[in-house]
Amino acid sequence: MAITVEFDTTQVKAALKRLDDAVRGEAAKQALQTGAHVIEAKAKVNLSGHGLHKTGRLINSVEVFNVTPKQALVGSRGVIYAPVHEFGTVIRPKRAKVLSWIGQDGVRRFAKMVRIPARPWLRPAAEESKAEIANVMAMVIRSFLK
């Protein structure tokens, strides 16, 4: 699952040009990592808001990873149902005529298909946090300019 968030980085690029190459790369990497942590925190709040935190497996799998001076990835690693909750899906039986499970009330249920609704938690985290991300990234860049 890939979600891209784009920002106007004209001012950041201008500030980074004033730094030498080694410092520029480290500043960009730290700025991206700090911005990504904002998305991570908001995504975890969104997961809790949707009630997707009962076992803690999904919420604990959300992290920032593969941080370089050009990108930082945020998402769930190792939880195959993370995209199901983000985008929704339809489950149909593969080897049987119907799906069967025991509900929380102890009663066996049958269905030809089950629709799991989309409950976006990662995309809204990135969209709703754009201003905060820009601010924390700018603070990191400023700290390198002092």
Image: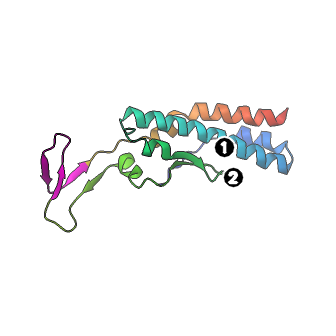
- Label 2 neighbour load within 10 Å: few <14, some 14-19, many 20+: some
Where residue 35 sits in the image (x, y, percent)?
A: 63, 39
Query: What colour scheme does the image use?
Result: rainbow
- For marks 1 and 2 on the same chain, the one whose residue lies earlier in the sequence: 1
Dot 1 corresponds to which residue?
A: 32
| Three-letter code, disc 1 | Leu
Where residue 7 sits in the image (x, y, percent)?
A: 61, 41
Q: Which mark is residue 68?
A: 2
Give the camera-side residue of 63 and 7. 63
Q: Is residue 107 magenta?
A: yes
On screen, residue 109 versus residue 17, left or right, reads left
Count of numbered labels shown in the rendering = 2
Q: Secondary structure at mark 2?
A: loop
Q: Which segment is the magenta one?
A: 99-115
Q: CA distance from mark 1 to mark 2?
A: 8 Å
Farthest residue toward the front? 106
Q: Residue at x 22, y 60 (%)?
A: 92
| Three-letter code, disc 2 | Thr
Q: Residue at x 26, y 54 (%)?
A: 90
Q: Secondary structure at mark 1?
A: helix
Residue 128 visible in image? yes
Question: Which quadrant would the C terminus be assigned to in this image?
Answer: top right
Give the camera-side residue of 45 and 139. 45
Q: Is residue 40 magenta?
A: no
Residue 2 higher or lower than 144, as above or below = below
Residue 9 visible in image? no
Q: Is the C-beta separation of discs 1 and 2 under 8 Å?
A: yes
Q: Residue at x 81, y 37 (%)?
A: 144
On screen, residue 31 versus residue 53, left or right, reads right
Farthest residue toward the bottom? 95
Q: Residue at x 77, y 46 (%)?
A: 26
